[in-house]
Image (cartoon, grey):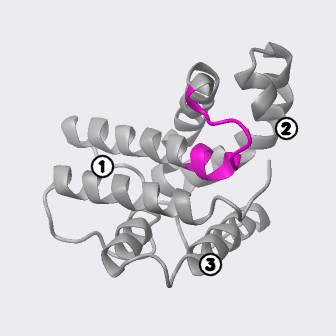
């Protein structure tokens, strides 16, 4: 349990944890931010390291990790919107095997929690992942909806993954 070791202050656990999680961060960031993906993934990994004390030991790492990456993606979207420069869209017609695996993994998590999540939560998460159009609500409301949906999703999939 690498994340538990990192929470306990074992700095040596970060490198193997980085190698396990960085490709996932990069794939998700690439799908959501295009050419800014490496910056987003690196920033997310720095947050994982700096905020490791906020992680609850013996809980699944991936829901917490994906929330950190999603927050970084949203930060890029906000920054890009302020700069009035659109975020590059990824061509969803051509997926690498890694992208297909990530998409399948996220789909399994969403499907496992499909019945338990409300419609608004499902739609918010699907819009965040680019699987559906974003609802026509203001940015602050959408961010809050996504934040609450991710919190509920985390609680639902707590047993879905093991560290």
Secondary structure at badge 2 equals: loop
Q: Earlier in the sequence, mark 2 or mark 3?
A: 2
Q: Which residue is mark 3?
A: 112
- At a point 63% along the width and 45% down the height, the residue shown is 25
Comparing 158 with 65, the one in front is: 158
Q: Camera-side residue: 137 or 51?
A: 51
State which region is magenta. 54-66
Cα distance in 3D space between marks 2 and 1: 39 Å
Residue 128 spot, x, y in % from top left: 40, 61
How far apart in space, not on screen, are marks 2 and 3 (Cα)? 24 Å
The reply, left or right, for residue 135 in relation to residue 92 is: left
Q: Secondary structure at mark 1?
A: loop
Q: Mark 1, mark 3: which one is toward the viewer? A: 3
The spot of residue 70 in percent (x, y) is 47, 48
Query: In the rendered structure, which disc, 1 or 3, sits on the residue that comes first in sequence?
Result: 1
Count every numbered label the image shows and give the total: 3
Please identify, in this view, whether the residue under mark 2 or under mark 1 is nearer the observer.
Answer: 2
Is residue 84 located in the magenta-colored stretch of the structure?
no
* Quadrant housing residue 134: bottom left
Q: Which residue lies under the disc numbered 1?
A: 86
Is 64 within the magenta?
A: yes
The residue that appears at 55% across and 27% down in the rendered structure is 47
| 13 relative to 3, above or below | above
Q: From what the image shows, is residue 151 above or below residue 108? A: above
Is there CB contact under 8 Å for labels 2 and 1?
A: no
Q: Residue at x 50, y 63 (%)?
A: 153
Where is mark 2, residue-wise?
1
For residue 46, say whether it is visible. Answer: no
| Label 2, residues with CA under 10 Å away: few <14, some 14-19, many ≥20 | some
Q: Image point 86% across, 31% down: which residue?
A: 16
Give the answer, above or below, for where 85 lies relative to 128: above
């Amino acid at each position: 349990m690498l994340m538990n070791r990192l929470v306990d202050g074992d700095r040596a656990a970060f490198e193997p944890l980085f190698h396990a999680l960085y490709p996932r961060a990069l794939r998700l960031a690439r799908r959501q931010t295009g050419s800014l993906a490496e910056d987003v993934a690196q920033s997310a990994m720095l947050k994982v390291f700096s905020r490791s004390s906020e992680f609850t030991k013996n809980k699944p790492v991936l829901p917490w990790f994906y929330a950190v990456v999603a927050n970084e993606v949203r930060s890029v979207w906000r920054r890009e919107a302020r700069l009035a420069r659109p975020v590059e869209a990824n061509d969803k017609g051509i997926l690498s095997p890694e992208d297909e695996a990530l998409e399948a993994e996220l789909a399994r998590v969403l499907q496992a929690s499909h019945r338990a999540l409300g419609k608004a939560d499902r739609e918010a998460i699907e819009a965040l992942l680019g699987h559906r159009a974003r609802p026509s609500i203001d940015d602050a409301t959408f961010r809050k909806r996504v934040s609450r949906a991710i919190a509920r999703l985390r609680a639902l999939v707590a047993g879905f993954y093991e560290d």
